[in-house]
Amino acid sequence: MREIPQSIAANMVQRYTKRYRDLGYHVRTLGWGNVEQQRRRFAMTLTLGLDLTGTRVVDFGCGFGDYYDFLKDVGVSCDNYLGLDINPDLLQEARARHGDDPRTAFAQVDLARKQSGEPLGDVGVMLGVLNLNLHDAFDNETYSRQLITRAFGLVRQALIVDFLSARLDPGYPREDFVYYHDPGRILDFALSLTPDVVLKHDYLPLPQKEFLLLLRKTT
């Protein structure tokens, strides 16, 4: 399988560092339009029939660790939360905001370079990580498949991933800097990893049409 170029991670670090220096701690630093959109996407992860209470959550591409704050706010008490990101500036902010909570930990990890090993937690979430259009730098679908495969191998129970859908919302213009995944192709790929799959494509745009994928371990 073709290896993901290291330049992709370097470019992403640069992209979000610039945003962080311009905007600081703000949802727009992470590419969100507003807090409501962020919270709505987070809330959809709780509609898949997976109870996160008492689990060890791994947040791949955690940003500021906002997903952990969301879980606390809605009364979901996970056992602990591990936030992973490639950007040291975002992680520094995350640690500053959650450093007093003994249930949280953060680490700088490039998932494209992460070798398989012992599971890092029970349930993984990967939200917004696969939305950037890589154009000529690398094939987006290959990139997504490699990262999902690696993340799924690092959790004990399940992985939740979100995507922008190629089934576009006619009320929202297509954007060149993001990548739209075909839900049928993603479903076929997911079933090659596990037969226990849920694909949710029936919720309102956020503001673009999105879908969620849940992959469960069978053993």
Image (cartoon, helix red, strand yellow):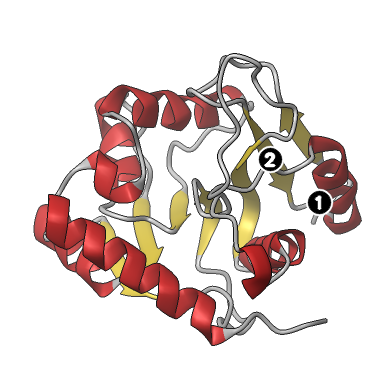
Q: Is residue 43 left or right of residue 181?
A: left
Q: Is residue 151 left or right of residue 188?
A: left
**CB atoms at circles 1 and 2 under 8 Å apart?**
no
Against 185, is 205 above or below?
A: above
**Where does residue 196 sit, x and y in percent of width and height?**
82, 42
Query: What amino acid is labelled 2 in the image?
Result: Leu
At 42% across and 79% down in the image, what residue appears? Answer: 10
Snapshot quadrant of residue 119: bottom right
Classify mark 1: residues with Cα within 10 Å, few (<14), some (14-19) or many (20+): few
Snapshot quadrant of residue 70: top left
Residue under pointer 1: 218
**Where does residue 56 sit, x and y in percent of width and height?**
45, 53
Q: Does residue 23 appear in the picture of this structure? A: yes
Q: Is residue 153 left or right of residue 93?
A: right
**Which of 83 and 130 lies nearest the eye of the viewer?**
130
**Where does residue 57 sit, x and y in percent of width and height?**
45, 52
Query: What amino acid is labelled 1 in the image?
Result: Thr
Q: How many marks?
A: 2
**Where does residue 15 sit, x and y in percent of width and height?**
34, 65
The C terminus - image quarter: bottom right
Classify mark 2: residues with Cα within 10 Å, few (<14), some (14-19) or many (20+): many
Dot 1 falls on a residue whose secondary structure is loop
Q: Is residue 105 left or right of residue 200?
A: left
Distance Cα–Cα, label 1 vs label 2: 13 Å
Q: Does residue 100 appear in the picture of this structure? A: no
Residue under pointer 2: 214
At 69% across and 26% down in the image, what residue appears? Answer: 168
Against 11, is 202 above or below?
A: above
Dot 2 falls on a residue whose secondary structure is strand
At 71% across and 24% down in the image, what residue appears? Answer: 201
